[in-house]
Amino acid sequence: MSEIVIAEAARVVIDSDRAIVEARQQGRQLAIKLGFSPGSATLLATAISELARNILQYAGEGEIVMQLLDRGRDQGLMVLAHDRGPGIADLSMAMEDGYSTSGRLGLGLPGVRRLMDEFQIESGVGTGTRVRVAKWNCM
Amino acid sequence: MSITQIKSETKSPSESTAQLLRELVGHLRQHRTQLREEWLRRIFEARLLTAMSRDEIFAEATSVYDSYVEALETRTLEALQAYAQKLSERIIPRGVETNEVVGIVLLLRDVLARSLFSKYPGDAGMLSDVLDAYEPAANSIAITVAVGFVRERERVIREQQEALRELSTPVLQVRERLLILPIIGLIDPQRARQLTEQLLRGIRANRAKVVVIDITGVAAMDANVANHLVLTVESARLLGAMVIVTGLSPEIAQTLVNIGVDLGKMNTVGDLQGGIEEAERLLGYKVVPSPERAPS
Amino acid sequence: MDVPILKQGPYLIATIQSALTDADLLRLRDTIVQDVGVHRAKGVILDVTALDVMDSFATDTLRGIAHMTRLRGAKTVIVGIQPDVAYAMAHMGLKLEGIFAALDLEEGLAYLDQPLEAGRGR
């Protein structure tokens, strides 16, 4: 990614569904403080909610870290969701739009990717999962 | 631009280049008044900076001259970059164009170069050495000023476009519960997002049940914007509003089909008038008074 | 956290707060489905005005409520989706198939009041 991380802004341990709410609320507050529009802050909070839930459901425990980004003209927010869970065996399938009329979105990752400006995922069976997304505040 | 050092591409050792430039700077400072006058004369002759008064031109010319010479002296461009930025901020609102800025800097470069002929009369070798030292430096300066100006101009244009976008996205309420959003011109991702946000807020504020989005005036639509249109329609539905899209050209219809939109599911009507009529029909149809509730 | 559910005539109105956890949502679903049966409700209004985020889990659960209550003969309407939330949902590709969305409580009630034949199905 092209960003420069300037500060870690928040870190939430995801170990309960209360934590999912906490993480997305902190994400929203951070985004607003950085000057993101309410609309963009909602996109960030939604993405965080999805990522946090994945951690809880598939790994049982993990962490959401939020970092401030700066690349001269713009500022942004990076969200890192990582866990030491079982990992995703087939990443390409997970990233497919497994969207059927019955609605089950699987891991919701394609949706998260649509919401964010940047999206990166690393996962391996037995090595856990790291998802890194970023949104820039372009005025 | 991260060039802060003026490169010297002469064959002579860099010390002698530095020496030559020092001499040159001394000469330019010594003859400052006269050279500046010469330059101003050339500017007027070339009919540059016509948007500015003589006094203004004189004031700016003085500081440009001094910054130019200082850049030659320090052999760095940072101060010049900062100066070019401030200068641009001043003169762009005055209506100064890019060709004028480039023009006056090149004129200065040439006026100063020519003055060297009178400084080293008859000494062709020396003159050649000095010019070898001067020319790359002078060109770096010219580029720095020009680029600084262009950057500032682009920034101003971007700001103006943003302001224009805000002004030109009216969401109109023409009847009760009915909103019309006529979209005109080019849509970039920023503007598309802005339009949708304004529309959704408008739906909530006006309690609209039907929205007519007219795209007759849209010049061209790529897949991204077409996707955004679909996204707008879906968002509006989540707010309980029905969307009618009017003014779909065959090209845009094709783009929508290409991105997988089922046009059969999207409510489209030929033109705006027809769309409004359809909207009124829907509104009339929707208001079904129930026996226990008073009609709204 | 318990979600307040009011009975208004033949309808149930559930007002959802913003800090609901996943477990709260599931509890809500079970409660509503049960209440529909107990009160023989004809319609359910899910008021999400206070929800600042609707992610895939929330969408799934609300859809689940709609399906289950329909099996018991009740229509479900979701009202009060915020503009930013609607945008995020559409952007993400979340669909509310099976539930009608109305602007607010008044519109939701108007929708439920419509005789079945005249209602525009989604």
Image: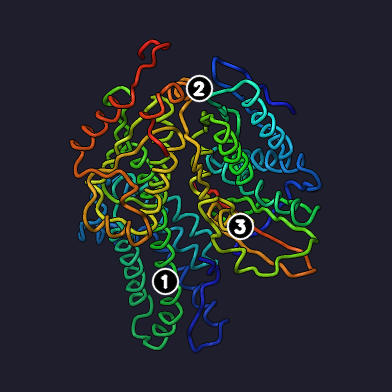
Q: Which mark is residue C105?
A: 2
Which of the pair B153/B143 is nearer the observer? B153
What is the count of numbered marks?
3
Query: Answer yes or no: do the residues labelled 2 and 1 have beta carbons within 8 Å?
Result: no
* Label 2: element kind: helix
Q: Residues within 10 Å of mark 3 (few under 14, many from 20)?
A: many
- Image location (x, y in percent) of residue A9: 73, 47
> Mark 1 and mark 3: span between their CA atoms?
55 Å
| Location of residue B221 (image quadrant) | bottom left
Q: Chain of mark 1?
A: B
* Label 3: element kind: helix
Query: Answer yes or no: do the residues labelled 3 and 2 have beta carbons within 8 Å?
Result: no
Q: Residue at x 70, y 53 (%)?
A: A54
Q: Chain of mark 2?
A: C
Which amino acid, by three-letter code, is at mark 2?
Answer: Leu
User: In the shown orientation, is residue A127 left or right of residue B248?
Assistant: right
User: In the shown orientation, is residue B77 left or right of residue B101?
Assistant: right
Q: Which mark is residue A109?
A: 3
Q: Residues within 10 Å of mark 1 (few under 14, many from 20)?
A: many
Q: Residue at x 54, y 82 (%)?
A: B16
| Same chain assignment for discs 1 and 3 | no
Q: Which mark is residue B161?
A: none
Which amino acid, by three-letter code, is at mark 3?
Answer: Leu
- Image location (x, y in percent) of residue C116: 41, 28
Which of the pair A108/B168 is nearer the observer? A108
In the displayed structure, would residue C105 be above or below residue B279? above
> Mark 2 and mark 1: span between their CA atoms?
72 Å
> Mark 3 and mark 2: span between their CA atoms?
33 Å
Q: Chain of mark 3?
A: A
Which amino acid, by three-letter code, is at mark 1?
Answer: Ala
Q: Which mark is residue B138?
A: 1
